[in-house]
Amino acid sequence: MMQASELFSLARDLAHLKVLSVYIDNRVVDPSRRFAWRADLATRLRKMREEITDAAERAQFDRAAAFLRETVPQPGGMWAAPGWLAFATDNRLVVIGELPGRVETLVAWQQGAVITPCLRAIKHESPVIVALVRSRTARLYRYVHGALELLEAMEAPAFERPVRERGVRSERAGRGYPAPRGALKTEVAHERQVAQSHRLATTAAARLTLLAARDGCIVVGGLPQQTRFVFDALPRQLQQRTIVSSELDGAPTHDAIVRGAKHGAREWRSRRGRGLVSRIFIHSGPHSVGGLAALERALYLKAVDLLLISPRFLHLERARAERLLLAAVQQGAQVEVLSGDAGTLLDSVADGVGARLRFSVDARASRSAAFNRPAMTTAPRAS
């Protein structure tokens, strides 16, 4: 499965070629319809071919479509990933494989690959590390590509040095009035338990730091006090990628852990998206633009460093979104498709599209008509 950087590199390589882009919604609940995609794909390819009037281009399309007749791997139905894609030109099958997220079935024949469905799907590539913490044990899971995997079970390290019993005096030191024996033992046991919990939290936090790596999200569930110990033991930067879930207390089932992982991933993506919108449109000042007209001018001037797009804009303006994405990746910009309320926030402040810039441009100028022309070899300087 592709990473975002690989997808952008592929889009740049295919930008000037005619590409057959195929996406298939691979979610099936009825086993008897496991291979229904074949008839649907054949119908869409036939309709696409009928729309091509030029004989030479139709021959190109036929050669590209021929690569899909015996594709490996094939979409696998209800036991496979929820999405599937293929890119083909008239002389080779460029890429083929499964996608970890849901996509709508789509067949397109155009200059350059259609990447927006893939871009939305591969956000599920980032792993979610789930930690279920009890008083003396912790179980670590990884949720990625729709599958939950138990990584390891941890136990609190043995308590080696007893806690010093305060308030207990030797007989030779004179007789005092200590607390009742039961209360003293309870205090000592509690201190011992807290110390063991801290040691377990420190060990678990070290493992979570390694497992989450650079882009993983962490979901911590279990007893409230234990989850707080683990959260506090994580590095500060990793705490920003950590969700403490109240839904994963007690003894959650496999399905409950999966739901918690999905909810945590959505919450993290939404939180990260809100942070991006805030930093770009509040703190970046002249190094940011919002709205379609200002964005198109910034893209023409090759000033875009990070492009933000909302799911609503992708849905309503797919063709225009493809054009914006292609222009952005061709100039080496990063692209983020925001999720949840972060996308809604971007819709409200910038009509669904915005960008962080490498340098300031006159965002108030009207859209440059030159943006719709073929790409120039050199871009004019920013005024």
Image (cartoon, grey):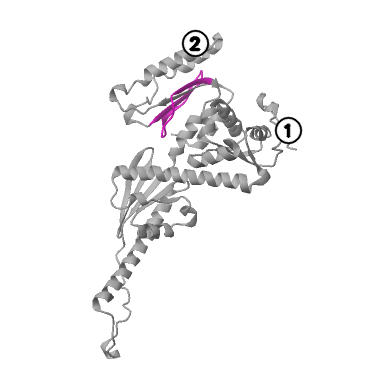
Q: From mark 1 to mark 2, how far is it between C-alphas?
A: 41 Å
Drawn side of residue 56 relative to residue 221, left or right: right
Residue at x 70% of width, y 26% of height:
369
SS of the residue under disc 1: loop
Q: Disc 1 residue type?
A: Pro
On whether residue 99 falls in the magenta region, the answer is: yes
Task: Residue type at mark 2: give it.
Answer: Glu
Residue that label 1 marks: 380
Percent of width and height locating residue 184:
28, 76
Residue 233 is tagged as none
Where in the figure is residue 258, as x and y percent of width and height?
34, 42
Circle 2 packing at 10 Å, graded few (<14), some (14-19), many (20+), is few
Residue placed under numbered mark 2 in the picture? 50
Residue at position x 46%, y 46% from top?
A: 268
Q: Return the residue nearer the eye: 177 or 206.
A: 177
In the rendered image, which quarter contains the C terminus? top right
Give the residue drawn at x 61%, y 44%.
Answer: 281
Q: Based on the displayed image, in which of its 4 quarters is residue 149 positioned?
A: top left
Give the side of residue 218 with respect to residue 292, left or right. Answer: left
Q: Which residues are magenta?
A: 82-109
Q: Residue 66: image x %, image y %? A: 44, 16
